[in-house]
Amino acid sequence: MEKKVAIIGVGQSAFVRGYPGSIKELAFEAFRDALQDAGITVDEISASVVCSAPEYDKQRSPAGVLAEYLGLVPKPTFYLESLCSSSSMGLRIAYSLIESGLHDVVAVIGFQKMSEITSAESQERMGRGADIQWESPFGTMMPAYYAMYAQAYMEKYGLTLEDLALVRVKSSTYGQINEKAVYRKPVTLEMFSDPESPISSPVASPLRVGDCCANADGSSCVIVANKEKAKALCKKPVWILGLGAASESVNLSGRELFTGLSVAINAGEQAYKMAGITPKDIDVAEVHDCFTIAEVMAYENLGFCKPGEAKELIRSKETYKEGSIPVNVDGGLLSKGHPIGATGGSQIRTIVLQLRGEAGPMQVKDPEIGLVHNIGGVGLYGNVTILGRD
Amino acid sequence: MAKKEIDVRFKKFGVVSFTATTKVNDFIDYLEKGKVAGTVCKKCGKKFFPPRADCYKCLSSDMDWFVVDGTGSLMTYSTLKYAPVGFENELPYTIALVDFGEYKVFGRISKEIPEDEIKIGMQLKPQVVTLPNGQLLYEFIKA
């Protein structure tokens, strides 16, 4: 794979509950972090893509408002939405803006301020990220949809509730050492069986509170450049080697697979093919663990193991930092929190830092190739991105 | 000039309805007759559930209705103990996907079936229910 488009800077705000500022101020935190990381000024950016999911805050058409605040006017900017995978889709669009020659340096800015509404209101909005005509009238919400996958998966492959809990225990191991994570407390297996612990509280069978990621406010920024700019501006460019994206029927009645996400399989195959590699070549991965079951399915959908074997990976700790395929060693969505539009950019940032050897206490030993798996809705949209170091 | 009347029958569907207008709102008339119905393309014969006004395969909008009958097999489900806004009074409730062979139907499992009796693979059939507020819904009951 020829190295043509690079990531030259990454930034992220802390993911928090109740961010005490506006969406502009929230986006500024990640944007400044990314510019400082890249060692460039705003003048180098020739276009921006602003990514979030609408209806969590009141601002309509946020791209213009953010561009003004970040000093990006009069350069082109636009809004892009694919639910929880918005900023990975933003990276895909930035790649094509650059590869087409239209722009040389593009900022992908993801943000979400979820705390202006209650958790139940948020579930209602997320539920409307599914089919509002035929499914939402039954009272659907994201945890319940993923719970349906968990139910089908556990029935077919013998995955246990304890296996699901092990995913959260791993996540909390790294959430505790990630200073940008919203949930930094330890989570133990015992908490899942302790009726007094909020972690064990049922949400949608078989998922419990501990199986679900938390809403958060946050922002992320990824600065993407063409080969010439990357070589001129950046000492440690990280190259985009592979991109995959797919969609699936919104209504579950149009789907065939309930023990995995077809979008992840399809997007993964595209990304591996474009990069000219196989799953065995991945040294470190970020997967979309909005729920514990989602991480389990991701192991299989990305080819880290065969269908039905994910439980062996988590039981044997192979996806821990020291294992054969480290996954979500920044705490993942489960511990970092999931500010929808910012999530993909945060995952990309983690892999960029890993490949540059700058991940601090979360650093995996000498990775060369990393992967980001970012899912929108209930497997409605899927993006897989493969990155490689210089 | 008289204002054109808009057909908003569909707002009767569900505990909470999110959309009132659709070209397939004869679906509501079937519910009122105690039937759950899908559409079938008159041109290519493809069956759709949920019903659609347009066939993406042959681009025809000439559709017939068919009634969901017989029994289906439970593919997967989840019982909610926490609900989105507007559904709090329904808790706990179980959403489900049932496979009827040619098509699948997403819906809710009747509370008449105890949670511990719900099993993937069990045979179910739909039943129309009228909620206390007059809204219409369908649920799955044991076949």
Image (cartoon, rainbow, N blue to C red):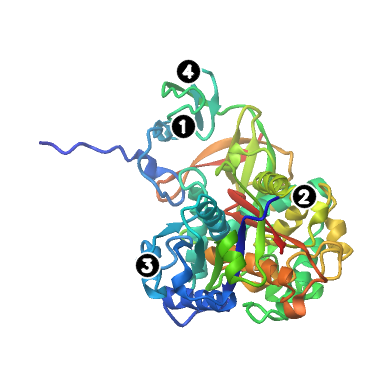
Chain identity of mark 3: A
Which of disc 2 and disc 3 is earlier in sequence?
3
Mark seen at residue A44: none
Give residue A173's position: percent from left, percent from top: 77, 76
Mark 1 or mark 4, earlier in chain: 4
**The disc numbered 4 marks a residue on which chain?**
B
Q: Secondary structure at mark 3?
A: loop
Disc 3 target residue: A58
In this rendering, the answer to whether A194 lies above or below A99 is below
Q: What subunit carries mark 1? A: B
State which mark lies toward you, 3 or 1: 3
Marks 2 & 4 on one chain: no
Query: Looking at the image, is mark 2 or mark 4 nearer the viewer?
Result: 2
Quadrant in which residue A388 is drawn: bottom right
| Residue carrying label 4 | B42
Q: Return the mark for residue A277.
A: 2
Give SS at disc 1.
loop
